Image (tube, helix red, strand yellow):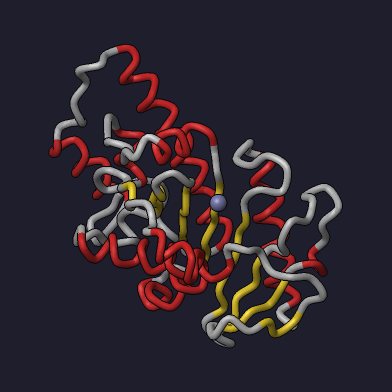
Amino acid sequence: MLEELKKRVYEANILLPKYGLVTFTWGNVSEYDPETKLFVIKPSGVNYETMTSEDMVVMDLNGNKVEGDLNPSSDTPTHLEIYKAWADKGVKGVVHTHSSYATSFAQAGRGIPCYGTTHADYFYGEIPCARCLTKQEIDEAYEENTGHLIVNEFARLDKDPVACPAVLCKNHGVFAWGKDGFDAVHNAVVTEEVAKMAYRCEVINPRVMPAPQELQDKHYYRKHGANAYYGQAKR
Ligand SMILES: [Zn+2]
């Protein structure tokens, strides 16, 4: 079942090592199908070189494996909570990485400030860093609670997950999302790139300030929302 989706999710996962976002078997991509209310995710601990689309695992939103010979990624409950909360907003792809620069911000417990238009084109404002989980949250249901924390953090900050399609998890790494698995990977690549630029920017000028709000607004809104004009008109 969902053969087409399994192929897409496989291809999206293969992009992670291609773009240098993952080492060994780290990282995972999933995509949600609103028609069947199922999602497809990478299997746990399988090498990207030997993995095939048939290895992809089909899951339902109750956390049951619907199809697949292998165990799903250990981060599956985090993906699931994100879909449960945000699929209605159009979040249909989720990716998790420990990409180096973004994870460095996460380990330092800092969000990625918007220092320029590359960031503003994709993310409205700072990419936030969610707190570390408590001992109890880690012990009882680590991956599921990571998902709850991400969703709650966006509610607490009154941030729209569509306008800021990534988060850092303190002492851990990156979750990014998008309208499908490929879009989520795209946003994960941009997260890593803006983290790299932000890091260098702070090294070059330790007193650097975020880009002016009007510049951030200009760049975000010319690509997103009702009055967007970036790119070509849809034919
Ligand atoms: Zn991780």
* Vertical comparison of 113 with 53: above or below: above
Residue at x 68% of width, y 42% of height: 17
- Left or right position of 4 against 197: right
Residue at x 79% of width, y 50% of height: 47
Which residue is situated farthest in the top direction here? Answer: 204
- Left or right position of 80 against 8: left
Residue at x 21% of width, y 62% of height: 156
Q: Quadrant of residue 3?
A: bottom right
* Vertical comparison of 15 with 53: above or below: above
Q: Quadrant of residue 161?
A: bottom left
Residue at x 48% of width, y 46% of height: 172
Q: Position of residue 224 (x, y in %)?
A: 30, 54
Q: Position of residue 44 (x, y in %)?
A: 71, 61
Q: Position of residue 207 (x, y in %)?
A: 20, 18
Q: In which quadrant will I find the N terminus? A: bottom right
Q: Position of residue 171 (x, y in %)?
A: 44, 44
**Count of labels shown?**
0
